[in-house]
Amino acid sequence: MKNFYNRIFLIVLDSLGIGAMADADKFGDAGADTLGHISDTVAHLNIPNLAKLGLASLKPLKQVKPADEAGGYYMALNEASLGKDTMTGHWEMMGLLTTKPFITFTDTGFPKELIAELEKRTGRKIIGNKSASGTAILDELGEQEIHEGKLIVYTSADSVLQICGNEETMGLEKLYHYCEIARELTMRDEWRVGRVIARPYTGRKKGEFVRTSNRHDYALAPPAETVLNALWRAGYAVVSVGKINDIFSGSGITESHHSDSSVHGMEQTIEIAGKDFTGLCFTNLVDFDAQWGHRRNPVGYGEEIERFDKKLGELLPRLRHDDLLMITADHGNDPTFKGTDHTREQVPLLIYSKSHKGNGRLETQDTFAVTGATIADNFDVPLPDGCIGTSLMRLLK
């Protein structure tokens, strides 16, 4: 079968939820609305390209008039998996249903047995061991880590173990080695977290610490094959941009590009759009979440959306007649909400191709997996055993 689309670009605006899911109260997230509350807060939201693709038609926004006629299809997606984290959301996009949430240590910190073993293996006394903002814990403990040779370990409301390391005094190689040790230890069922994250920074004193772009995620490998593996096995390109390679532990990826920022990730995607390949370009833009959602900064978040929209305006003309663009998110992270955690929200799915003659709103779907199922259907690749999702190809005209 000839592919209807030769290339598919799937872009994830990390954490851009559009309103609480029906079961959000079970996650403590009733009333969360990432995009809506950003719109309520900021003075301006200049997003003509997203509006043209239907975002303001899908989600009413104070500053943005819905397009008279959307340039693409748009719909809301619910998450079928039990979770609201990055890995669960991305894995579901590619067909995996997660029924057992990853372990979190938000309220208690990590068990003393894990900390003791990590201290033994790294040779450093651990400080922190609590749920904290990454910038706040650097201001609190960064000087102590540098001057006393300690090791900052902390978590969040997500299923993560994060280790800080000063690039100038500890060095990246040593930080990454410590994270590899932590990843090995946290493979045990009782300590298993979704990700171990290296959090490098520069600076020598409180108020001057800056986290760098050399973050590295050590994620659990997907528990089963995904649509990415099916594409790879069939000989199609699977090009990852941003932290996609980390999220899937490289499984099913044929080419990987590390991004320094979300703007950089879009620049890489635009460059890839100028190349010849047949398959998928899968991009994650993490700054929405890491820089603004977790730091509860709706103004910064809104400005990041505007920066994305500008780059989207550069990408759209480079798309070919037989390309398909899909823009979505993996969870919410309402910067006006309580705490600093992700939020259980619906996400948008905007679909655009120059070949489309139709447009408009499509029915809300019950799983993120429609994205992966659509991609697999386009390339005539069977879904791996156990994968969920129904293709939307029949609706795209």
Image (cartoon, helix red, strand yellow):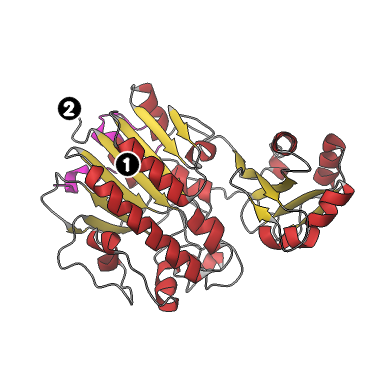
Q: Which residue is mark 2?
A: 2
Q: Disc 2 marks which amino acid? A: Lys
| Residue in the image at 53% along x and 66% along y | 26
Q: Is residue 377 rendered magenta in the image? A: yes
Q: Is residue 87 left or right of residue 167?
A: left
Residue 302 screen position, x and y as percent:
43, 67
Q: Residues within 10 Å of mark 1 (few under 14, many from 20)?
A: many
Residue 232 drawn in magenta: no
Secondary structure under tag 2 reads loop
In depth, the one of 161 and 26 nearer the eye is 161
Q: Examine the rendered structure and indicate whether residue 357 appears above or below residue 237.
A: below
Question: What is the x, y in percent for residue 65?
Answer: 24, 73
Q: Which residues are magenta?
A: 376-397
Q: In the rendering, at what x and y percent does residue 18 appear?
A: 39, 65
Quadrant that contains the N terminus:
top left
Residue displayed at 48% across by 58% down: 288
Q: Residue at image x 21%, y 36%?
A: 5
**Disc 1 element:** strand
Q: Are marks 2 and 1 in contact (CB under 8 Å)?
A: no
Looking at the magenta stretch, what is its main secondary structure?
A: loop
The numbered mark at residue 334 is none
> Residue tagged by mark 1?
9
